[in-house]
């Protein structure tokens, strides 16, 4: 058989649903039909596409393993004519379960390749459920030797080196790579390193979509052996793209095609929030969402995200004023709802708070009003929102930011009530950044209106919970610029206290923030899931004990020489 000198690969950057084996198989069959129309020789799907990624402990369920095998065989038979298929799926072999890619061609499962490097850090826990595969060789796909390093297999050099040494001509890497702020640059740097070391071109295919707290941005690409970028798929949306390869004396080279411009900074983070909320609502079958709209910036941004994700008809905002709610807040909440075109209701919490106060008057006799009475207001609001959710089916969206969740500036069973939080991993300063960006832009695929959707006064007034007279957040917290810098140092970078102080922060302020950060762990354990944006979010990335007596010795830290300010990035 004469070795081919051209190859057409369809990259299927799609959005699977975890556990939906029938639906994912049908999505794959539809993509195969499209790839056939495009004239592809092979169509490639992301990591574990048939199962959805990450399937977590579903992998350990024998019935899930068996059903996966049956769907894989069905897909092979259903797609017997047309291009070959490379698709990610779990694979049970001799009592061990692997993260695998199967080659389907001619109606059968022709071969599999198994993931070698199983990530077990941050959000990943693959060693819990998978066995590591042996070092792989290339798969023969229509006469071309294709190396298939699976996701983490390209983050070290060994697997790609082995593939190159065993005759691979092109590298195709299926991925389930979740988004965070630094991830796009990190991926490209890793891909360039593998191409440079191996001398082989690389097609990097990533999934798109939301899965619980994780969001996947797609943004698949191709690098030629000289590290040039002939193909860049868009971020944040599905795409099936045909890439054409030609072989010369110097090896295989991908022909130049579309190179999409990728959003960055606030634009990318905003898209992540929208996609995470949309897929959580859609994949879990909620008809829409309900939220408390307070007239503050956090709830205003969440309302904008919800409208962009679901459309205004599926978003219900409720203002829940107390005697401390200002006229400005009432006006601003109504203006925001009007700008977004959403249903807006106003329900006073005063009668319910008065009833609770009366019920507790004997028990609380002789004590002064304090944070207890403030939290009662928040919990009344949470109860009302949950009642509306129960009555009409919309999921309550909670609106606390990462700064608040870090230091416990939130009320359990009150403003923390809800099924999902799209801004959970955004610091307060980032909330302002994303809001300003959204007022000036309409993201691609958004279902909300253009123009200013969050009134300017919400951006300029002092943040306040309005749980007592003349209250502002800065009564009990440092200014958010300082607070967020301290938190990034302690949370994202795990910097020593001495290094944080060396950045110009007051000793007592750093000490207070560290203490609040540890004390609020029990609240974070009970918080709703939310979109992961940073390199280290609360929950999957950062797992601290609730009962924890460790505190850094501040006096010793000050006396000791500080390490390089800025800490180690992740």
Image (tube, grey):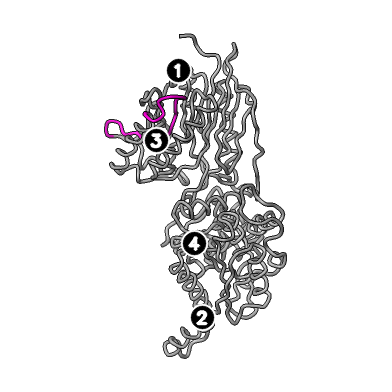
Q: Residue 549: where, in percent of width, then height?
A: 44, 62
Bounds of the magenta segment: 77-95
Looking at this view, name the residue that lies furthest to the top: 2
Do the residues bearing badges 3 and 2 touch, measured as CB atoms within 8 Å?
no
Q: Mark 1 points at which residue?
A: 166
What residue is rendered at 35% in x and 45% in y?
58
Q: Is residue 17 above or below residue 118?
A: below
| SS class, disc 3 | strand
Q: Residue 518 carries which label?
A: 4
Quadrant where the N terminus is found in the figure = top left
Q: Which of marks 4 and 1 is in front?
A: 1
| SS class, disc 1 | loop
What residue is rendered at 54% in x and 64% in y?
407
Q: Distance between the residues labelled 4 and 1?
A: 51 Å
Q: Quadrant of residue 77?
A: top left
Q: Is residue 399 above or below residue 353?
A: above
Quadrant where the C terminus is found in the figure = top right
**Residue 559 seen from this side:** no
Residue sitting nearer the eye, 298 or 389? 389
Give the mark, 3 or 2, whose residue is nearer the N terminus: 3
| SS class, disc 4 | helix
Q: Residue 26: where, in percent of width, then height?
A: 42, 38
Residue 303 magenta: no
Q: Mark 3 points at which residue?
A: 89
How many neighbours does mark 1 have within 10 angstroms: few (below 14), some (14-19), or many (20 or more)? some
Q: Residue 373 carries which label?
A: 2
**Residue 415 seen from this side:** yes
Give the mark, 4 or 3, whose residue is nearer the N terminus: 3
What residue is rendered at 42% in x and 21% in y?
137
| SS class, disc 2 | helix
């Amino acid at each position: 058989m004469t070795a081919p000198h051209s190859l057409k690969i369809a990259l299927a950057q799609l959005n699977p649903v975890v556990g939906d084996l029938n639906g994912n198989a049908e999505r794959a069959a539809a993509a195969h039909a499209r790839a056939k129309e495009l004239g592809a020789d092979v169509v490639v799907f992301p990591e574990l596409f048939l199962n959805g990624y990450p399937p977590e402990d579903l992998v350990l369920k024998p019935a899930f393993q068996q059903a996966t095998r049956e769907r894989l065989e069905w897909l092979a038979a259903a797609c017997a004519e047309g291009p070959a298929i490379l698709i990610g799926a779990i694979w049970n072999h001799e009592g061990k379960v692997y993260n695998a890619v199967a080659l389907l061609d001619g109606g059968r499962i022709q071969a599999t390749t198994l993931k070698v490097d199983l990530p077990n850090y941050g959000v990943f826990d693959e060693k819990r459920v998978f066995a590591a595969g042996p070092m792989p060789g290339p798969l023969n796909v229509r006469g071309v030797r294709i190396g298939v390093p699976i996701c983490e297999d390209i983050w070290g050099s060994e697997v790609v080196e082995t593939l190159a040494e065993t005759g691979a001509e092109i590298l195709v890497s299926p991925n389930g790579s979740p988004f965070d702020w630094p991830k796009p640059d990190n991926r490209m740097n890793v891909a360039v390193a593998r191409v440079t070391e191996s001398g082989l071109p690389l097609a990097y295919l990533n999934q798109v979509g939301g899965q619980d707290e994780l969001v996947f941005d797609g943004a698949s690409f191709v690098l030629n052996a000289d590290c040039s970028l002939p193909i860049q798929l868009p971020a944040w949306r599905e795409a099936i793209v045909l890439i054409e390869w030609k072989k010369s004396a110097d090896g295989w080279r991908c022909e130049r095609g579309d190179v999409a411009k990728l959003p960055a900074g606030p634009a990318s983070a905003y898209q992540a929030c929208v996609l995470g909320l949309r897929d959580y609502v859609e994949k879990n079958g909620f008809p829409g969402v309900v939220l408390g709209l307070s007239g503050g910036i956090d709830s205003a941004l969440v309302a904008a995200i919800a409208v962009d994700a679901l459309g205004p008809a599926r978003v219900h905002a409720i203002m829940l004023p107390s005697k401390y709610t200002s006229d400005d807040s009432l006006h601003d909440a109504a203006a925001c709802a009007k700008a977004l075109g959403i249903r807006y209701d106003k329900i006073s919490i005063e009668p319910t708070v008065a009833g609770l106060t009366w019920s507790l008057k004997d028990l609380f006799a002789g004590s002064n009003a304090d944070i207890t009475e403030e939290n009662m207001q928040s919990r009344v609001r949470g109860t009302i929102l949950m009642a509306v959710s129960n009555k009409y089916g919309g999921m309550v969206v909670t609106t606390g930011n990462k700064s608040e969740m870090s230091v416990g500036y939130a009320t359990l069973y009150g403003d923390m009530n809800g099924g999902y939080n799209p801004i959970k991993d955004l610091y307060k300063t980032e909330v302002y950044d994303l809001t300003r960006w959204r007022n000036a832009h309409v993201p691609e695929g958004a279902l909300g209106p253009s123009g200013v959707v969050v009134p300017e006064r919400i951006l300029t007034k002092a943040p306040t919970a309005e749980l007592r007279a003349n209250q502002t957040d800065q009564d009990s917290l440092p200014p958010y610029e300082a607070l967020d810098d301290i938190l990034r140092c302690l949370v994202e970078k795990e910097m020593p206290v001495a290094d944080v102080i060396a950045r110009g922060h007051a000793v007592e302020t750093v000490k207070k923030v560290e203490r609040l950060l540890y004390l609020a762990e029990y609240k974070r354990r009970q918080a709703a899931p939310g979109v992961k944006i940073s390199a280290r979010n609360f929950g999957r990335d950062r797992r601290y004990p609730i009962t924890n007596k460790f505190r850094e010795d501040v006096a010793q830290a000050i006396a000791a020489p500080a390490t390089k300010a800025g800490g180690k990035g992740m």
